[in-house]
Amino acid sequence: HASEFGLAAWFNREELSRDSWLLSRAYCLAMSLAVAEHLAESALLGLGGKGSRWPALAGWARAAGLALVLAGEALRKSAIVTARASFTQSIKHRRRPDHRLVTSGVYRFCRHPGYVGWFAWAVGTQLLLRNPLCVCIFAAWAWKFFSERIPYEEHLLLGMFGSEYAAYARRTPVWIPFVDSPVPFSLEGKAEDETF
């Protein structure tokens, strides 16, 4: 959270607020649930450590979790650094004078790299902690959040950038499964449905 706050301060000082720490009640509740599950399962089931009942599973989960955490963090931070002032932590309803459509860097391969990075990080933290319930809960909560936020944000981006955003969206995937977009990705770079 400190790095997120630091990047917000560096690239978007006018947007900086207490909310830039990204420590909402929902986030704190989710992380409290994760810690509780980890402690309970470690005590009751002996996951990891000496005498573990499932050492191979614990090792695999930790490795996969660490990989997702690092990849997700790198992707999100790359998105922030690439977009600079165009990356904000809140949805903008009007185009600011300095707001530009970023289609280079990680945005060339992923339409919402900050969201995909956060999704991978969130699920990865729970794999790293070997929290099977929270892996499912975090994946479901993150998916629900982004399945609502991305289509809403993309409608606004279409209003701000018009055909420029539509062309970008047609050639660039979202990478979060089953998230509906007002402009579907197409391998040919053409919209499947031109009515939006």
Image (cartoon, rainbow, N blue to C red):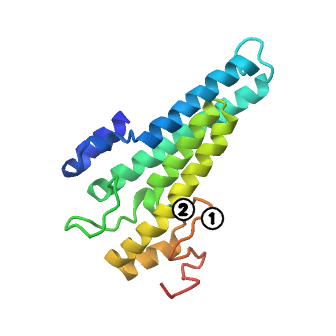
Q: Earlier in the sequence, mark 1 or mark 2?
A: 2
Q: The disc labelled 2 sits on which kind of residue?
A: Ser
Which residue sits at x=51%, y=58%?
146
Residue at position x 61%, y 31% in the image: 128
**Which of the 4 image quadrants contains residue 189?**
bottom right
State how far apart marks 1 and 2 are (Cα): 8 Å
**Front position in the image: 143 or 69:** 143
Rendered location of residue 157, percent (x, y): 37, 72
Q: Residues within 10 Å of mark 1 (few under 14, many from 20)?
A: few
Query: Do we see residue 111 in this rendering?
Result: no
Q: Position of residue 145 (x, y in %)?
A: 51, 56
* Secondary structure found at label 2: helix
- What is the total number of numbered labels drawn onto the structure image? 2
Image location of residue 191, percent across then percent down:
54, 82
Residue located beneath label 2 in the image: 147
Left or right position of 70 against 95: right
Residue topped by disc 1: 178
Q: Which residue corresponds to the image point at 27% horizontal and 41% vertical from the top-left?
A: 18
Q: Are marks 1 and 2 in contact (CB under 8 Å)?
A: yes
Query: Considering the numbered disc 1 on the image, is that residue within a helix, a strand or a loop?
Result: loop
